[in-house]
Image (cartoon, rainbow, N blue to C red):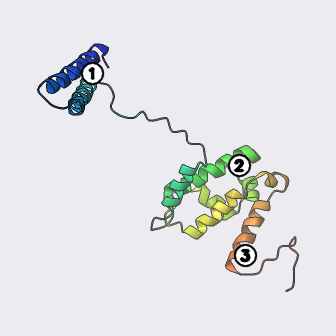
Amino acid sequence: MNPRATVGVVVFAVAAAAIVWFFGVGVVQSLAVGGVVAAVGLTWTAIRDGVPTTWPVPPVRSAPGARRELSETAWALRSRGGVPERALARARAVARHRLRTLHRLDLDDPGDRGAVETLLPPAVVAVLLHERRPGLDLATFGSILGAVEALDDRDCRTPGRAAAETDHVTTARTGSRTTDPTATERQP
């Protein structure tokens, strides 16, 4: 704001309070009149001078997997008619990132396709490679997320473990028996 205009508004507010007090209004009421005149005058000066009247918006830094991004993905999954393309695109981006950083593989490279299919089930790879996949149901999307989530440092030592764990989890959810050789059977 212009300091000269501010001083002028304050002087005018004091003069208004003095005039009102001179004509018999009480001290408290005349100070209130002076305060109102000052508030209106300072607001008018700020608007006229072009001072921005909006709050400054800090830049939004969104890290991959941040709470806001997860919340948006969760709300996107509530839509009817299958999983939206935006959620599937995010799963593709995470899969590409994990394959690139943890395993030095490229999901889109045909030469790496065999190595990628040892880490992920072929059906998951097929869904991740098709850019437009209409009508993908939530259960299939859940299995894709499980397979992508299983791509961690443990998979670097034992290739194919992500696919086995994903199949084991899917089998456990459907209720059929699994023939996992590493699992120990316990009788009740």
Is disc 2 in contact with disc 1, using a CB cutoff of under 8 Å? Answer: no
Q: Residues within 10 Å of mark 3 (few under 14, many from 20)?
A: few
Q: Is residue 182 at least partly visible in the picture?
A: yes
For the residue pair 71 and 34, the one nearer the viewer reads as 34
Q: Is residue 131 at least partly visible in the picture?
A: no
Give the residue furthest to the bottom: 188
Q: Which residue is mark 2?
A: 99
In which quadrant will I find the C terminus? bottom right
In the image, what residue type sits under mark 2?
Leu
Is disc 1 in contact with disc 3, using a CB cutoff of under 8 Å? Answer: no
The residues tagged by marks 3 and 2 sit, at their Cα atoms, a distance apart of 26 Å
Counting every numbered tag in the picture gives 3
For the residue pair 7 and 184, the one nearer the viewer reads as 7
Q: Nearer the viewer, mark 2 or mark 1?
A: 1
Residue 49 is tagged as 1
- 55 shown above or below 21: below
Q: Is residue 133 left or right of residue 152?
A: left
In the image, what residue type sits under mark 1?
Asp
- 133 shown above or below 35: below
Q: Identify the image quadrant of residue 100.
A: top right
Q: Is residue 30 left or right of residue 128?
A: left
Q: What residue do we see at 55% from left, 39% from top? A: 61
Give the residue furthest to the left: 23
In the image, what residue type sits under mark 3?
Ala
Q: Which residue is mark 3?
A: 172
Residue 118 x/y as whole percent: 76, 58
Q: What residue do we see at 15% from left, 31% from top? A: 25
Residue 15 x/y as whole percent: 19, 20
Q: Nearer the viewer, mark 3 or mark 2?
A: 3
Q: Residues within 10 Å of mark 1 (few under 14, many from 20)?
A: few
Q: Secondary structure at mark 3?
A: helix
